[in-house]
């Protein structure tokens, strides 16, 4: 079977920064907002971090090469982002920390933050879905 080249928007060599100044501003603003939501997602267990950081990288790639480079080289997100984009997966430690944090925060939310059974059920379903996603990612040692 023939391997199809990566056509993802995060393949930096194939994407050009927008030529229009207003478009660059919109892409950079969208990237910054997405990154902010991703950072909030570190604290809130229901809000996923990875998709928003990936969206931020894609937006920065179109709006500001400098911001894209900063994000990919960032000491907190850079390695994780590069590994994810290149299909190398997550380290065992990152997987364990992610799932532990997820379940601790979800269970605390279920026990202390709400009495509504529907909200509790939604939180548990989200935690299960995120756990399945994390377990399906390639794990490197």
Image (spheres, rainbow, N blue to C red):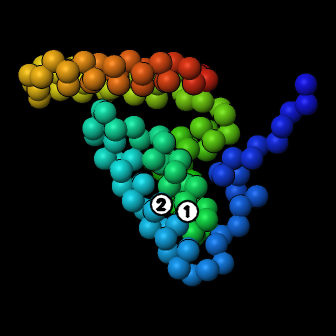
**Residue indicated by mark 1:** 60
| Residue 35 in view (yes/no) | yes
Seen from the viewer's position, the closer of residues 56 and 120 is: 120
Q: Is residue 62 above or below residue 89?
A: below
Q: Residue at x 31, y 27 (%)?
A: 101
Q: Are marks 1 and 2 in contact (CB under 8 Å)?
A: yes
Q: Earlier in the sequence, mark 1 or mark 2?
A: 2
Check residue 31 in the rendering and tell me which mark sits there, or answer none: 2
Q: Position of residue 14 (x, y in %)?
A: 76, 58
The answer to which of 57 and 26 lies nearer the viewer is 26
Within-10-Å neighbours for mark 1: few <14, some 14–19, many 20+: many
Drawn side of residue 22 relative to residue 122, left or right: right
Q: Dot 2, how many residues are within 10 Å of its Cα: few (below 14), some (14-19), or many (20+)?
A: many
Task: Judge from the rendering whether residue 40 lies leftward or rightward of residue 4; answer left or right.
Answer: left
Query: How many tags in the picture?
Result: 2
- What is the residue that sits farthest to the front in this orientation? 118
Residue 118 position by quadrant = top left
Residue at disc 1, secondary structure: helix
Q: Residue at x 63, y 42 (%)?
A: 85
Q: Secondary structure at mark 2?
A: helix
Picture quarter containing residue 122? top left
Q: Quadrant of residue 104?
A: top left
Vertical comparison of 14 with 16: above or below: above
Please state the horizontal and vertical placement of residue 25, each as a whole percent of the image: 50, 75
Q: Is residue 120 left or right of residue 24?
A: left
Q: Quadrant of the C terminus?
A: top right
Q: CA distance from mark 1 to mark 2?
A: 6 Å
Q: Residue at x 65, y 70 (%)?
A: 17
Residue 136, numbered label: none
Instruction: Find residue 37 and report its horizontal and vertical position in percent.
Output: 36, 50
Looking at the image, the residue that sits furthest to the bottom is 21
């Amino acid at each position: 079977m023939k391997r199809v080249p990566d056509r993802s928007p995060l393949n930096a060599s194939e994407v050009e920064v927008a030529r229009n100044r207003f478009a660059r501003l919109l892409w950079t603003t969208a990237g910054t907002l997405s990154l902010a939501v991703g950072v909030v997602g570190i604290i809130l267990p229901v809000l996923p971090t990875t998709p928003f950081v990936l969206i931020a990288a894609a937006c920065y790639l179109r709006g500001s090469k400098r911001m894209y480079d900063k994000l990919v080289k960032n000491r907190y997100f850079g390695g994780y982002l590069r590994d994810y984009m290149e299909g190398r997966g997550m380290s065992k430690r990152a997987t364990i920390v992610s799932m532990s944090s997820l379940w601790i925060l979800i269970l605390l939310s279920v026990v202390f933050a709400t009495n509504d059974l529907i909200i509790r059920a939604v939180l548990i379903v989200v935690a299960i879905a995120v756990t399945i996603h994390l377990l399906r990612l390639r794990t490197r040692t």
